[in-house]
Image (cartoon, grey):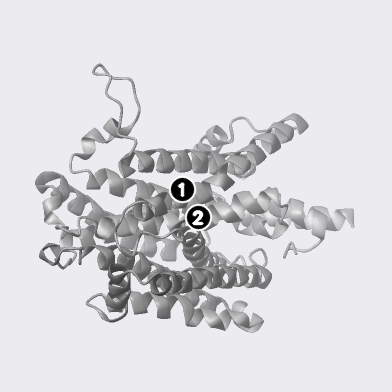
Amino acid sequence: MTDFMAGQNAVITEEITRIPLRYPAPRAWWACFCVSLMLLLSFVISATVLLIYGVGVWGNNIPVNWGLAITNYIWFLGIGHAGTLISALLLLLNARWRNSLNRFAEAMTLFAVICAGLYPILHLGRPWFFYWIAPYPNTMTISPQFKSPLSWDFFAVLTYLTVSILFWYIGIVPDLASVRDRAQKRWQQVLYGLGALGWRGSARHWARWNQAYRLTAAIAVPLVVSVHSEISLLFAAGPIPGWNSTVFPPYFVLGAAFSGFAVVAMIAVALRHALGLGDIVTERHLDLLGRFLLATGLMTAYGYWAEVFDTLYGGEMQEVGTLMDRLTGLYAYSYWGAVILNFVPLQLLWFGAVRRQPVILFLIGLSVTIGMWFERYMLLTTSLYRDYLVSSWGEYHPSIWEWGLYAGMLGVFFTPFLLFVRFLPVISAFEVKEAMHETGDLSHA
């Protein structure tokens, strides 16, 4: 039995370390990377135009002074939440099945938070002065305006990004050492050796690593709640109809987890197929992802229902008018798009056979990802474009530069993620081996 487990450990290590050393699908990777670079070029062009001409090139107006930029800011932050949930929370709960998913989920979180953090900076108008919103010592002893959402964003996003980087890097160190030890080329030995920080796998190293890893996880878990609660309070703290609701903090947190699990499911299916990882990312993992997606989706659906109920029960004329406008008004397509795309295909996940079908799970995840984008867009535009005063009404239509920046942000996300897939271990080899040793099964049930 001991020899069998040792053989299995060697097979797992070889299968995972071969990806950065001898990538199994170079043509598909280069095709995806070229598309990603084209999207990244769109970001460079759109951001350059924005810096030269200012935010006037966007479609923002009065009263809709929050548009596509803030929609995408919330959307990208939401995508990153599932990575923290899968990695940090399930680590503290000793859920072994996370070990085949946590590495690429953490990377997804990291790059999604970077994309989200760029939007408020670009939205400032003078982004080169973004550090003014930080409480740093300055010669004029001027403190930031802590009532401003920009200051809230600064603390929330910077803290989340810092902890995400630490958590991801601490977790990958042992696997970088494994890749270093198997590398044949000198540049690979040097590169992975520097990243491994002298890791030798001694008992002392493992003890310190375990302490740091779990401590960072304990810090990261509250951030899942705090970051999106902070974003929801940007809306709920004001008197805008359709926003002033106490259900927003849990509604936003659950919606973020919902969209995040959808993206994790899509990435898991794509990597499983492209890299031949079917024996590590098993049907059991797809089934569990489908269950989490279904659970968080039903919780998000409850938020939709609670919002409608509270509005009708309260009976305030402006709130009811905003609700009716969402259902039948100019932007009704965004509301019904969110409802249909989020919750109709989701019902297929009640069936275990569907949850274990990679293609169907991928398509459901894609539907949810698009639906959650529609939800963010709907929340912004339908509450702002018709203010209390009829004289302040004004439609909002995103400009080509907003769409270009959004496409470019996808490039900002996919370019480093593809580099991560190509040059770093996408699966946590040592955690998979540890789970298999304890459970005797790669499904880690």
Up the image or down, 97 lies above or below 428; here it is: below
Q: Nearer the viewer, residue 435 or 161?
A: 161
What residue sits 47% from the left and 82% below the top?
344
The answer to whether any part of residue 428 appears in the image is no
Up the image or down, 166 lies above or below 295; here it is: above
Q: Nearer the viewer, residue 176 or 355?
A: 355
Question: Quick one: label 2 or label 1, which is nearer the N terminus?
Answer: 2
- Residue 441 horizontal side relative to residue 81, left or right: right
Q: Position of residue 246 (x, y in %)?
A: 45, 58
Q: Quadrant of residue 395?
A: bottom left
Residue at label 2? 81
Q: Position of residue 57 (x, y in %)?
A: 12, 55
Report how far apart the C-alphas of labels 2 and 1 lie in the structure. Answer: 9 Å
Amino acid type at mark 1: Val
Up the image or down, 205 lies above or below 399; here it is: above
Secondary structure beneath label 1: helix
Q: Position of residue 133 (x, y in %)?
A: 30, 34
Mark 2 crowd level (few <14, some 14–19, many ≥20, 10 Å Cα): many
- Residue 45 horizontal side relative to residue 436, left or right: left
| Whether label 2 touches label 1, CB < 8 Å | yes
Q: Position of residue 406 (x, y in %)?
A: 27, 59
- Residue 144 horizontal side relative to residue 114, left or right: left
Label 2 vs label 1, nearer the camera: 1
Amino acid type at mark 2: His
What residue sits 42% from the left and 73% below the top?
308
* Image quadrant in which the N terminus is located: bottom right
What residue sits 26% from the left and 65% below the top?
381
Q: Residue furthest top?
A: 139
For residue 131, the mark is none
For residue 227, the mark is 1
